[in-house]
Amino acid sequence: MEQLGKIVPLVDDVLGPEVIGMYLHGSSVLGGLRPASDVDVLVVARRSMDEQERRALVGSLLATSGSVNGARPVELTVVTRREVCPWRYPPVGDFLYGEWLRGEFEAGVVPQPVPMPDLAVGITSVLAGDRPLAGPPPAQVLAPVPQTDLVRASLAGVPGLLDDLDGDTRNVLLTLARIWCTLATAEIRTKDAAADWALARLPAEHRPVLAHARELYLRCRYSEESWSAALREQVRPHADAVLARIDRLSRR
């Protein structure tokens, strides 16, 4: 992928020998990029970044990521190895860049270390995909995530997803389906594969919304997302139905 040919050198330019390993994960390794997929990269570093390094990396990513640059959105996470090996929950992520935060970064905000429960999902994807961009295989750098913490991380993201249900409908519905699938199967699947799994288990009245979200994911970029009034009315009942199933599984 041409974009990776830019991401790897820009990380090297900022962190150089402090990089232990750089790993591709997400849709890129789970089943292939879709039109709206991010390029997900995890960087494992020897130490925490200083302020100058944070600003430099943000600046480089702002010039490389997203439709404003004619490229896919990049989600890049940096974590120090001591935070994830041996594994602990929740780990502290040292740096996170995502296109949904572009406005903040353009206004001068610089990513700082914060607890990142979702690293449990990312690291599990990294280990399953086994796609190093630099450094040794991920199994030599990262500890496996216990299933209990994978479940905790999946559930931790639900409140934030519901806050975005109206504004980011496609992504929220597909992510809820993936959480349900992960809790039931202990596997992390692509959003469309998780949607297929969920569609086979939903009653007929709750399928159209998810089927539409899946089709949008496979065919369209985010800027092309569209929902009819009839489907919009079904979004909340569908989400509630999936949440009920997630809740039942989480209580087991």
Image (cartoon, rainbow, N blue to C red):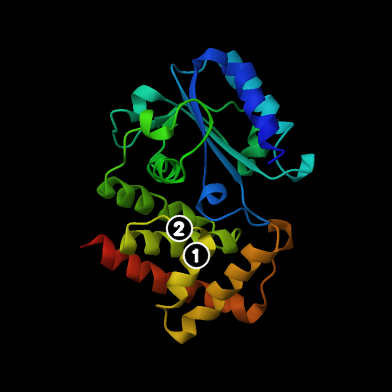
Q: Quadrant of residue 138 in the image?
A: top left
Q: What distance separates the C-alpha of mark 1 from that of mark 2?
A: 6 Å
Above or below: residue 169 compared with residue 59: below
Residue 160 screen position, x and y as percent = 46, 52
Judged from the image, the secondary structure of the residue bearing numbered disc 2 is loop
Q: How many marks?
A: 2
Between 125 and 202, which is closer to the camera in this rendering?
A: 125
Residue 197 screen position, x and y as percent = 44, 70
| Numbered mark located on residue 50 in the image | none
In the image, taking residue 159 as reference, residue 3 lies left or right, namely right
Above or below: residue 62 compared with residue 129: above
In the image, taking residue 58 as reference, residue 69 lies left or right, namely right
Mark 2 crowdedness (10 Å alpha carbons): few <14, some 14-19, many ≥20: many
Identify the residue at horizontal 62%, vertical 82% (top origin). Answer: 230
Identify the residue at horizontal 37%, vertical 57% (top origin). Answer: 187
Identify the residue at horizontal 60%, vertical 75% (top origin). Answer: 232
Residue 36 screen position, x and y as percent = 65, 55
Marks 1,2: beta carbons within 8 A? yes
Above or below: residue 153 compared with residue 57: below
In the picture, the quarter occupied by the N terminus is top right
Residue type for callout 1: Ala
Identify the residue at horizontal 28%, vertical 28% (top origin). Answer: 86
Above or below: residue 241 compared with residue 79: below
Is residue 107 among the parts visible in the rendering?
no
In the picture, the quarter occupied by the C terminus is bottom left
In the image, taking residue 33 as reference, residue 21 lies left or right, namely left
Mark 1 crowdedness (10 Å alpha carbons): few <14, some 14-19, many ≥20: some
Residue that label 1 marks: 193
Residue that label 2 marks: 189
Residue type for callout 2: Arg
